[in-house]
Image (cartoon, rainbow, N blue to C red):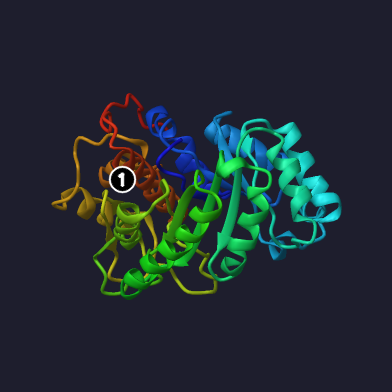
Amino acid sequence: MSAYSPLLSIKPSEMAALKNSSDGCKGLIKPIFILSKWLGSNKIDNSIDKIKDSFSNRTAFLTICDYEDCLGDRPVHHTLKSLYEPDYGYQNWCSFFSDHSNFVPSLILRDISNLPRQIENLYAFNRGLLIPFERDKNFSAIESVCSLISNVADQGKNISILLDFKKLRQRDIISRVGEALDYIERIYRKLPEAKIIISSSSFPDGFTGIENQQIYEKLAFTQIAQRSPLEVIYSDRGSARSESIGGGGAIPYARIDYATKQSWEFFRAATEGSDFAKYRQQAEKAIESDNWDQSLKIWGTQLIESTATGDTYAIKSARDATSARINIHLHQQAYAISSSDGIYDTDDDWTD
């Protein structure tokens, strides 16, 4: 099993970042895709097509967006809502996986009245099963759900349990580590062969006065892994944040982020505006920084380098900058967590 399972939304920046990741990077990760509508599309098939376009038919987990994100009047909204129908153990959701054999299914825990049947239906695909728990929603159900799973999956074989802690602040690391280990111990008593996926995000919500920050979820994960009786898998947000920041009429500041294995570096314009000249200035600062790795030639770093040389087709918007950031982050974490050689072994050339 891959050592890194980032949570990825089906959004332009994340799909572009993944699509342009090297084959070596893609081979080291097993993403958790969050099924949702693709932009203004009317069909859910377009979302699946975007995943395939970015990740081919490689094995990945598939969960579904929050029910509130399924609401709307377009056909895609009706399809998503139908997948949430709990009848016959979420029959529609289970049937969805019949047509998509590369996805490891996940439980929907919104209505658990028919949970045993859903567990049996999904586990019967013999692909494994993901049980997604979110700290702000359903951690209290962990023991009862694991008891039901133990009736189907002997000792928890081929079961992956996602413990999603969402937002993580530096001051919360010690308490979250203790909380995670407590839940892992409870899971271990029910499912001693299950694997645990630990996810959270410490990416800042604002950048005024912030030039760099440690990736606190890595610190927390390392402490958990050292003491866990079960195998643990690292996860974070491909988008970096645990939840999207609402829009508004604010004028953005041009910003380019550079990811290392253990930290983020932020290069943000001092004045408002996001024209290309400001992105170029930040790109120049990035490649001149002490932590810039000149040997790392991947899509995201090449975008930044091209911007610094004046290529107006490189980074010219916040979306472009976000795609570059995610691409670099995925590559750095995939190789850092797996301890695999080959971080520089890529023949990928940047193309517009």
Q: In the drawing, does residue 350 fall left or right of residue 55?
A: left
Q: Pick the residue in front: 63 or 260.
A: 63
Q: Residue at x 38, y 29 (%)?
A: 24
Q: Is residue 167 above or below residue 260?
A: below
SS label for mark 1: helix
Residue 169: x %, y % from top left: 36, 71
Q: Is residue 14 visible?
A: yes
Residue situated furthest top in the rendering:
347
Residue situated furthest right in the rendering:
87
Q: In the drawing, does residue 187 fall left or right of residue 28?
A: right
Q: Residue at x 29, y 42 (%)?
A: 336
- Quarter of image, res 86: bottom right
Say which amino acid is labelled 1.
Answer: Ile
Q: Residue at x 74, y 32 (%)?
A: 99
Q: Is residue 238 above or below residue 298?
A: below
Residue 297: x %, y % from top left: 28, 34
Q: Is residue 221 above or below residue 156?
A: below
Q: Which residue is mark 1?
A: 304
Residue 66: x %, y % from top left: 66, 61
Q: Residue at x 46, y 58 (%)?
A: 184
Q: Pick the residue in front: 254 or 45.
A: 45
In the picture, which quadrant includes the C terminus? top left
- Quarter of image, res 65: bottom right
Q: Is residue 311 visible?
A: no
Q: Pick the residue in front: 97 or 127.
A: 127
Residue 222: x %, y % from top left: 30, 54
Q: In the drawing, does residue 339 fall left or right of residue 231?
A: left
* Mark 1 neighbour class, 10 Å CA radius: few under 14, some 14 to 19, many 20 or more: many
